[in-house]
Image: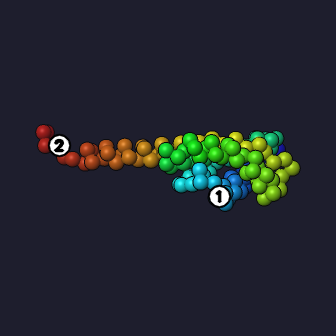
Amino acid sequence: MSSFRIDRISEECRHAIDAIIREMNDPRIAGTYAVTRADVTRDLRWAKIYVSVLEDDKADEMIKALKKAAGYIRRELGMRVDLRYTPELLFERDRNIAYGAHIAQVLREVAPREDKPDDEA
């Protein structure tokens, strides 16, 4: 199977899973989050779904809720995406967006120090 086909399937799964999660009425799955990536294996048996949660205090509870709801999400995914096998879902927390925000904050703190003229020279 070509890599391009797996990439298309991964992206289609990401879109469908994002829509499924947004339609769920679980209070633990609320707040600001994004399904950032889905990695589907070449044999279409497993999919690792990366979810970025911006509120750190709700992140662990949300990932636990998604892991518990994996069966429901998989069933809905099977109905929305036409595949021979619906992959088993593994949810992981993606910390890239939070890390990027942290780096941006550090750069904002450093930038004013660099703009000050040197009076000692």
Spot the residue most to the top.
Answer: 120
Residue under the image location 49 percent in, 48 percent down: 55
Q: Amino acid at mark 1?
A: Asn
Indicate which label's residue lies in the foreground, 2 or 1: 1
Which of 110/86 is in front?
86
Instruction: Point out residue 27 in the picture as x, y percentages from the top left corner.
Output: 59, 54
Residue under the image location 56 percent in, 47 percent down: 52
Which of 80/64 is in front?
64
Quadrant placement of the N terminus:
top right
- Give neighbour class at mark 2: few <14, some 14-19, many 20+ (Cα, 10 Å): few
Q: Find residue 12 and report its image quarter.
A: bottom right
Residue under the image location 83 percent in, 52 percent down: 83
Q: What kind of element bears circle 1?
A: loop
Instruction: Point out residue 45 in the picture as x, y percentages from the top left corner.
Output: 80, 41
Quick one: label 2 or label 1, which is nearer the N terminus? 1
Task: Left or right? Give the position of 16 relative to 96.
Answer: right
User: In this orientation, does residue 34 appear?
Assistant: no
Instruction: Point out residue 110 in the picture as x, y percentages from the top left corner.
Output: 31, 43
Label 1, on which residue? 25
Label 2, on which residue? 118
User: In this orientation, does residue 16 appear?
Assistant: yes
Task: Left or right? Give the position of 83 relative to 73.
Answer: right
Instruction: Point out residue 23 in the picture as x, y percentages from the top left corner.
Output: 67, 60
Quadrant placement of the C terminus:
top left
